[in-house]
Amino acid sequence: MDRHQIEKLTQLGELVDLGSGRKGVRVSLQYQPRLTQRERDARRDLLRHEFASVAADLQPRGAVVDLDSLSLSAQTIEAVLPLDRIDELERELGDRDVRVDLLIDRDVV
């Protein structure tokens, strides 16, 4: 994430305090592989397992992963990634077929 993007997120008030002076960015994590399970419960179980594994890897590095935010249809969960490690974590997640998208609150007029 470049300096301009960070400045814009700061201006919009989109950075989250992770404690101990660290800032984070709210993101959506999307499991990219197409799920082949026909049963909804089987798809949910697979996604919960995959995202629990992702959370176990990210949390010791300062990320906050909301496993209760699972969207089965979008194959996503929400998380807060530490700003100082976002590029590194985004690359690693991409290697695991997990897409990272910024979550930005927008006012609709």
Image (tube, rainbow, N blue to C red):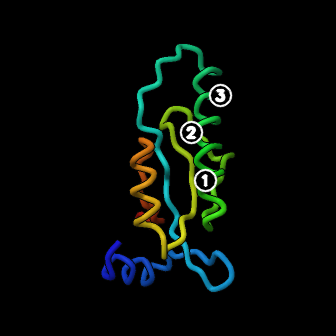
State the image coordinates of residue 97 (x, y, percent, origin top left). Answer: 41, 41
Q: Is residue 103 left or right of residue 52?
A: left
Q: Is residue 78 left or right of residue 10?
A: right
Q: How far apart are the alpha carbons under marks 2 and 1? A: 20 Å
Q: How far apart are the alpha carbons under marks 1 and 3? A: 19 Å
Q: Amino acid at mark 2?
A: Ser
Circle on res. 57: 1
Q: Is residue 101 left or right of residue 24?
A: left
Q: 36 and 40: which one is in front?
A: 36
Secondary structure, mark 1, is helix
Residue drawn at (39%, 56%) of the image: 91
Mark 1 burial class by Cα count in 10 Å: few <14, some 14-19, many 20+:
few
Q: How far apart are the alpha carbons under marks 3 and 2? A: 12 Å
Secondary structure, mark 3, is helix
Mark 3 burial class by Cα count in 10 Å: few <14, some 14-19, many 20+:
few
Residue drawn at (66%, 47%) of the image: 67
Circle 2 residue: 71
**Looking at the image, is mark 2 or mark 1 earlier in the sequence?**
1
